[in-house]
Amino acid sequence: MHIDKYTDAILNCRFCFMCRHLSGIGNVAFTESDTPRVRASLLYGVTTGRIQLDNPDVIACLYRHDLSGACRRNCVKHFDEIGLNLAARADIVASGCAPASIQALADSLMQTARWTVDGSGEVLYFVDLYTQETGTVAAAFAKIMAKAKVSYQTVSGGCIGKGLKTLGYLPEAAAAAKQFAAVVEKSGAKTVVVSNPAAYDALVNDFPALGIKLAATVMHTSEYILSLALPWQNPQEVYYLESDFLRNYNSDLPAPHSLLQAVGAKNRPFGTNDEESYTCGEGAVLLPRIDASLVEKLAQYIEARADAPSTDRILVASPYTKLMLGKYTSLHVQTLEEFVAEAI
Ligand code: SF4
């Protein structure tokens, strides 16, 4: 079983409650089961045969996880409770126990694994489905590129494997990743730029783990815009909400903070601590389609922590988080691209 690779996490997390305060779903649902300790206890039961992985309550608990990575990042030994959860989902799928709703969601993702390439240039900008849905993020990037006089290609389309991997459909995720890699290679691009941190994590971590090596350099938009070294300033007071994928999955990628510093923004601390995830479940990629009520609760939890909800300028790296905060709160939210483009 896939979970057998995570014995360390199972054995250590099942007796530990140190990171319970960083359990996003546990904090909004007030459920002890939505913590690394109880999830590990359940999976320990699976390894001993006392709990079956086809138990609907266990399956529902495992698919409720927001996968922020906050617990793993702040764990003293960084036990991989995220890897454990993803492995358990893969075991559920491999044993034919995936709920019909999860199977239907995976089927719909597979249908989206098609991409269209437009434009010309050595930079290829990936417009994923969440970025498309904002209607404004790709336009902000276009404004920056026009001002910088850099021509570029766009590749637009659906799942490049991240969503399928998150649901536990590993062979299908690998197939989508290989198809997308072929499209990137064919474009001849030297740099691939992505706004969606989930796509960034897929390209820099998941693809190499699958043996897929892209010739192009992969950059998040914050890294790429910073590399342009343009002289714009936007000296506003802002609250930047960290991305799960950029911070917790990628060793605190410094580019978002460096970019804010470069444009003269004054970043103020948000909430009660700098360890929690304030992303509405970015790490879970598909939480709105698994249980939208949880995303609504996560969004309201964030809104309740704003100093002045009606006037604060909230910045995010993730188009997903912008969409969800826009849907469920009255907060004023921009992505990093939009904030920089505003200054042009
Ligand atoms: S991730 Fe670390 S802190 Fe959290 S339950 Fe596991 S061992 Fe404890």
Image: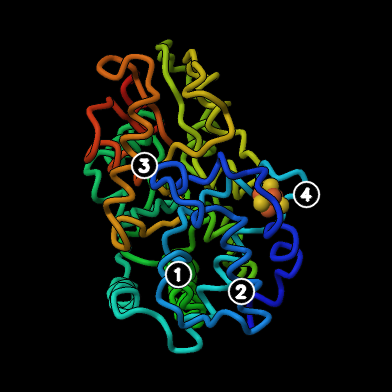
Q: Secondary structure at mark 1?
A: loop
Which residue, given by chain and number where applicable, does mark 4 sit on? 77
Which residue, given by chain and number where applicable, does mark 1 sit on? 161
Which residue, given by chain and number where applicable, does mark 3 sit on? 298
Looking at marks 4 and 1 on the same chain, the residue that comes earlier in the sequence is marked by: 4
Q: Please tell me which residue lies in front, 272 or 232.
A: 272
Marks 4, 1: nearer the viewer: 4
Residue 100: name its quadrant.
bottom left
Q: CA distance from mark 2 to mark 1?
A: 11 Å
Residue 262 position, x and y percent, is 54, 19
Crowding near pointer 4: few (<14 within 10 Å), some, many (20+)? Answer: few
Looking at marks 2 and 3 on the same chain, the residue that comes earlier in the sequence is marked by: 2
The residue under the point 58% across, 41% down is: 247
Tag 2 and tag 1, C-beta contact below 8 Å: yes
Looking at marks 2 and 1 on the same chain, the residue that comes earlier in the sequence is marked by: 1
Which residue, given by chain and number where applicable, does mark 2 sit on? 210
Q: Given the current orientation, which residue lies at the most extreme bottom position?
A: 96
Quadrant containing the C terminus is top left
Drawn side of residue 92 relative to residue 247, left or right: left
Tag 2 and tag 3, C-beta contact below 8 Å: no
Q: CA distance from mark 4 to mark 3?
A: 27 Å
Residue 139 position, x and y percent, is 27, 39
